[in-house]
Amino acid sequence: MEFSQDENNNLPLTKFESMLKTNHVLFFDSEEFENIIHHYLNQGKIALAKKAIKLGLDQHPTSVNLRLFKVEVYVFENKLVEADTLLNELYNLDPMNEEIYIQKANIFSKKDDHQQAIDVLKRALELTDDVVDLYSLIGMEYLFLDEFEKAKECFIKCLEEDIEDYSALYNVIYCFEFLNQTEEAIEYLNIFLDKNPYCEVAWHQLGKQYYNLKNYKKALAAYDFAIISDDTFVGAYLERGKVLEKLKRFNEAIENYSITLELDDPTSFALLRIGSCHEKLKNDELAVQYYYKTVHEDPLLDKGWIAITRFYNKKRDYEKALYYINKAINIDSENVVYWKLYSQINHRLNHLEEAERGYKKTLELGNYELNTWLSRGDILIKLGEPEAAIYNFEQAIEFYPENSEIEYRLAGLYLSLNEEDKGVFYLKNGLDHNEDYAFIVEELFPEVANKILVKNILKTNQ
């Protein structure tokens, strides 16, 4: 039993809290203590729960349930030895109490012994008719073991006992998704909806499965039914908006996202999507307004700043784009996409040192695209750092062996440093692999292209 503000059930709680303020110890029956403790644990008020347990056991020292609350607090505080000792005592007193098994399983779980926890919970199943919570606990233990099929079976059993256990429904779908069983998830949800046709959560999940299969028509129908079942279901409107975007029905998508702003507090996601839809509709002023609303709503949302960056980048307003990409990087400095965009914008602004720094960071974060290596190396050449450029291209050729674009650059660099053997080696390799890119030498290294040695090699190859 939980206490509420509008029922007489809260009288023992008021009486208990009043007692704590005085030196008078009042009597409560054991059930009242259980309700008081349960209330405090639900509220996360562990110190008050412990006081209630102590006073409760002072007045009812033989109460198994009160001592089980003590076990629960021990487990919460990670005092597993004390919890285990007390549980063993309680088992001797009441071996048929399923709560003893649940707490025992909780201890095993805390020790990462999930199979033992499952075995204990299965024994508890034999002692109770209220199996929903136990199947849920067993399912969670299977999730810890990455045994998703067995976990799924447990959560399905929860739903067989209680068709409105939406937490179990979410977990069932999570298992289907992890197992990449989209078709099976759809089949299960359709059977479930035959039994519970007005379950907005099931319709919502069905829509997500169809969306994953890119069956947008069926996804849209599922979200329609979710909204019919509950016209205040914000999640259904958001997902419906995403589908409409895929179908390029941007005005309708905006309508759906806008409904969520009326039903609940504005979300940065909805504002961002509205901005994106307006941009696709060429409503540039509205687009940027919503992007600004996005970052106003959530200043730490890097996707909002990146949206503004890309907006100004398309408009070739590179100074503004640079300002906003810096905002995004300040929020997430390990995002390779942001650094790549930072590099490109600085490159267009001819901020070569900043662009080189950005490309270097992009590579450090694992973006090994050919264009990243080439752009960084070409900037190093312009900055008059041939050794650094060579090191860059030597690394690049490990990822792209026999790539003539890299080989011609290395040829030009080595020949400009009068390392003829290496220069000739890369020049001949470049010509063997793709002579069409030979213009790179002339374009990036005109002084090298005029050398007699280079002219002879190029002429011989014609």
Image (tube, grey):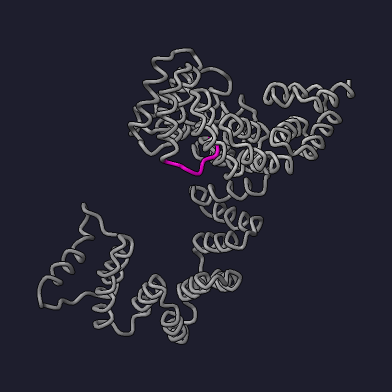
Where residue 298 appears, as percent x and y from the top left, is 36, 36
Quadrant position of the C terminus in the picture: top right
**Would residue 302 be counted in the magenta stretch?**
no
Instruction: Give the residues in magenta.
Output: 331-337
Residue 415 position within the rendered picture, expressed as x and y whole percent measured from the top left:
73, 34
* Number of marks in picture: 0
Q: In this view, does 291 lie above or below 109?
A: above
Which residue is drawn at the image coordinates 31% and 62% (left, top)? 44
Say which of 183 and 177 sits in front.
177
The answer to whether 128 is drawn above or below residue 451 in the figure is: below
Q: Residue drawn 48% across and 32% down?
A: 236
Measured from the top left, where is residue 113 in percent x and y? 57, 72
User: Which corner quadrant of the image does residue 208 belong to?
Assistant: top right
Q: Is residue 343 left or right of residue 67?
A: right
Q: Which residue is drawn at 33% across and 84% down?
A: 62
Image quadrant in which you'd find residue 64: bottom left
Report the residue at 48% width, 17% height from top: 316
Compared to 194, does 324 lie above or below?
above
Q: Quadrant of the N terminus?
A: bottom left
Question: Which is nearer the eye, 44 or 281?
Answer: 281
Residue 225 appears in the picture as rendered: no
Q: Position of residue 276 (x, y in %)?
A: 47, 23
Q: Is residue 63 visible?
A: yes
Q: Quadrant of residue 366?
A: top right
As displayed, is residue 7 above or below residue 211?
below
